[in-house]
Image (cartoon, grey):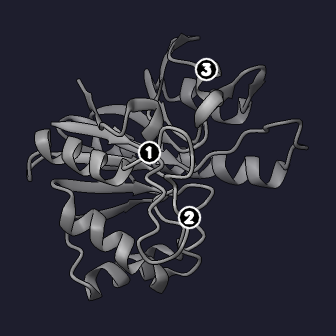
Amino acid sequence: MVYTIGDLHLSLGCDKPMDIFSGWTNYLERLTNNWNSKIRDEDTVILLGDHSWALKLEDSLKDLEYIDKQLRGRKILVKGNHDLWWSTMNKNVCFCEKNGFSSISFLFNNSFLVEGMAVCGTRGWIRENGEPQDIKILNREAGRLEASLQAGVKLGGELTAFIHYPPIFGTEENVLITEILHKYQVKRCFYAHLHGSSIRNAINGERDGVEYRLVSADGVGFDPIKIN
């Protein structure tokens, strides 16, 4: 089985509590119970960014240890905007190997074939609250998504996108991202990033032939959703 969820916002190695926010009380306990009650060791979970509040890779140790040791299944991690600890692919992989985190992989310019699904994705980017566009970031993230989808084509299976930022939010659309989704005929796109009142404006449904689904942790009740 394949599941997905985003925005765990772990702070086991630093002082950044999330339970000060509405709806996040005892979230770690709720997440652990929900996760391990249905996910088996042979299942795969795609985590859509904002995994840890750590600022450096070495400071993410306790958070990655929790993901690897306390949560069942194989985990594929996508980068989020708060993942400042995220380093190069080689350093991330070596860090996990050094610490025995055998159930963690990273989705970054690559793809994974999981039960007939080509798991593709990137961090993405979209304007919020009138922020100016950053063409450099837009082009970079679009390029990473295309590289991931190209890798997915070689693997075969259904091309499925997993992006931290919503490609569409309110009246804003990251056209560079959505055009690539259409170019590769992606039919399903899962995303995260949105919390609290922003969840009300999330797109959950079909838009121009692509089915979008929000899976941020508080948006799904700290309960990973199954991908059919």
Mark 3 touches mark 2? (CB < 8 Å):
no
In front: label 1 or label 3: 3
Q: Earlier in the sequence, mark 1 or mark 2?
A: 1
Q: Residue at x 50, y 36 (%)?
A: 191
In front: label 3 or label 2: 3
Q: Position of residue 136 (x, y in %)?
A: 81, 55
Q: Position of residue 135 (x, y in %)?
A: 84, 48
Residue occupied by mark 3: 200
Q: Earlier in the sequence, mark 1 or mark 3?
A: 1
Few, some or many residues within 10 Å of mark 2 (<14, 14–19, 20+): many
Q: Residue at x 48, y 57 (%)?
A: 9
Viewer-nearest residue: 124 or 171: 171
Q: Is residue 36 above or below residue 96?
A: above
Q: Secondary structure at mark 3?
A: helix
Q: Secondary structure at mark 2?
A: loop
What amino acid is labelled 2 in the image? Asp
Mark 1 touches mark 3? (CB < 8 Å):
no
What amino acid is labelled 3 in the image? Arg
Q: Position of residue 219 (x, y in %)?
A: 47, 31
Residue occupied by mark 2: 83
Mark 1 touches mark 2? (CB < 8 Å):
no
Residue occupied by mark 1: 6
How far is disc 3 from disc 2 in space, using C-alphas?
24 Å
Q: Quadrant of residue 97?
A: bottom left
Q: Residue at x 43, y 46 (%)?
A: 25
Q: Is residue 125 left or right of residue 21?
A: right
Q: Residue at x 47, y 68 (%)?
A: 11
Q: Quadrant of residue 187?
A: top left
How far is disc 1 from disc 3 in space, using C-alphas?
17 Å
Q: Is residue 17 above or below residue 92?
A: above
Few, some or many residues within 10 Å of mark 3 (<14, 14–19, 20+): few
Q: Is residue 194 left or right of residue 65?
A: right
